[in-house]
Amino acid sequence: MQGKLELLLGPMRSNKTAELLRRAEMRRQYAKQYVLVLKPSDDTKGGPGVVESRNPNGHTKMRALEFNSGNPWEVLGAIAETEREIGKRVECIAIDEGQFVDGLFLFTKHLLESNHDVLVAGLDLDFRAIPFGEMLNLTWLVTAFGGSITECMAYCSCGARALYSQRLIDGQPAPYLSPVKMPGDSYEPRCAEHFVLPGRPH
Ligand SMILES: [Zn+2]
């Protein structure tokens, strides 16, 4: 038996986390599944152990297991322990901020092969509009294992669809050479016309 993958992709403020938690809650409430929510430790939105959505209208908070983004494999022990505790299988694993997870492709593949359904939400592109981590590689796992790809929508302040995450530092567009992970930065979704990246080489 194999699991299926539901992949949620989009820029900042496209309600990815809210959608992930909505689907997790649906599975709990109606399918009576045990859903384990995972959160890489690079995520700075919530406190320890809690995945938090920025959308105030959605299911804003849910308990989550925090793990070191450099070693997702440490979670396997926690899954086995949870299964012993609840006396049944963990049917579904939901991973938020997937772009931060090292080895996300192989880790997700392992979970699918171990018969867990997997939900993964994350940014498709980083602030330089370059593929972020292994998120886009996961589309192959949807082809191989089945499931779905959802492009979460965000909008630029001009009203056009926003495909880019504009990083701002002190309200100004961040330069291309600023670090990919940076504490204290902020973002807004922008369309191609309004996305600004000073110092971009291409
Ligand atoms: Zn725009």
Image: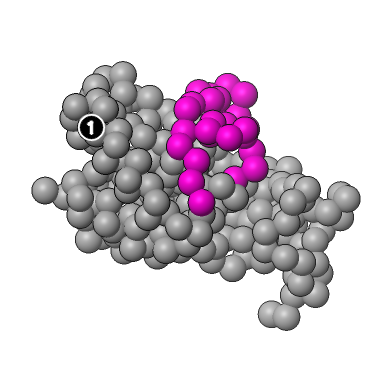
Measured along the vertical axis of the image, is residue 91 above or below residue 149?
A: above
Q: Which quadrant of the figure contains the C terminus?
A: bottom right
Q: Let me know if residue 147 appears in the view.
A: no
| Magenta segment | 43-68
Q: Position of residue 113 (x, y in %)?
A: 20, 54
Q: Position of residue 136 (x, y in %)?
A: 44, 62
Q: Position of residue 189 (x, y in %)?
A: 67, 48
Q: Which residue is mark 1?
A: 84
Measured along the vertical axis of the image, is residue 107 above or below residue 7?
A: below
In this view, the residue in front, 141 or 84, is 84
Position of residue 26 in the picture relative to residue 84 (left or right) = right
Examine the structure image and report whether residue 53 is included in the region drawn in magenta. Answer: yes
**Which quarter of the figure has residue 88?**
top left
Position of residue 113 in the picture relative to residue 184 (left or right) = left
Look at 24% across and 22% down and name the residue there. Answer: 32
Label 1 is placed on what type of residue?
Arg
Look at 73% across and 80% down and name the residue there. Answer: 201
